[in-house]
Image (cartoon, helix red, strand yellow):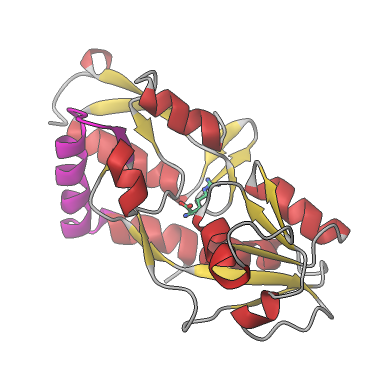
Amino acid sequence: AGKEKAEDKKVLQVGTEATFAPFEFMDKGKVSGFDVDLLNAAAEEAGYTVNIENTGWDAMFAGLQSKQLDIGMAGVTINDKRKKSYDFSVPYFESTSMIAFKEGANIQSAQDLKGKKIGVQNGTTGQFAAEGVVGKNSSSISKYETAALMFQALQSGDVETAVTDIAVALEYVKNNPKSGIKTVGDDKEFKPEYYGIVFPKGSEYKKDFDQALNELYDNGKYAEIYKKWFGK
Ligand code: ARG
């Protein structure tokens, strides 16, 4: 792997939902972020090139189902339900849910979500985490198609709180220091989760990308990319 000429490399089609900084977001018309750098490095290691498109969350999974996409790379948490329909790489990032809220909402723990209007990105672990506290069919949960729309709703006051992935909540606060948005985690309520690269079931590429990720852990490139985006 890695010795082929560029023109000989197979181009893999990748879907993402690029409103999820720092993992994937649009920057000057291009998808950018930690996931993009990591996937490019892994592809290079494995001898492929990748074409990453901002398909959106649902279309990404649909494209994987129909095999129009070879890869989904979107900070996707590995869980048992998803494993029934998709294959995942070895884990590449540890995460957990975090609550973001508008100053004054007085939220100290997950239990304080009760009685609040909650925004989530539809079909994400943030939704499942919120449902774990307030119940699965709770009318207090509003579901948005993208993480950006969820943050907009929080900013505009359509919802009082939002539940999303920790690094994404922290990045939002960092990038919007005057927004009055605060965050709180809850170790007791929200479990650790792990992101994986997603493949259609039975994909021939999983093995190559697992090997590539392990190589990037060993050769220091993962640490380099991590440092670029998270500064440690
Ligand atoms: N990790 C969460 C999940 O898998 C959220 C991922 C959302 N990703 C995105 N690019 N919007 O459910």
Q: Quadrant of the N terminus?
A: top left
**Residue at horizontal 49%, vertical 36%?**
16
Closest to the observer, 169 or 101: 101
Q: Can residue 63 be seen by looking at this rendering? A: yes
Is 13 rendered above or below residue 211? above
Picture layout, residue 65 above or below residue 143: above
Q: Residue at x 57, y 63 (%)?
A: 131
Query: How many numbered marks does the figure carry?
Result: 0
User: Is residue 211 located in the magenta-colored stretch of the structure?
Assistant: yes
Q: Quadrant of the C terminus?
A: bottom left
Depth order, front residue of 70/52: 70
Which percent across, then down, holds residue 158?
85, 57
Q: Nearer the viewer, residue 108 or 179?
A: 108
Residue farthest toward the top in the current orientation of the protein: 7
Q: Is residue 148 left or right of residue 67?
A: right
Residue 156 in the magenta stretch? The answer is no
Task: Look at the image and tell me whether residue 165 can be seen.
Answer: no
**Residue 162 at x, y = what percent?**
68, 63
Image-quadrant location for residue 116: bottom right
Q: Which residues are magenta?
A: 198-221
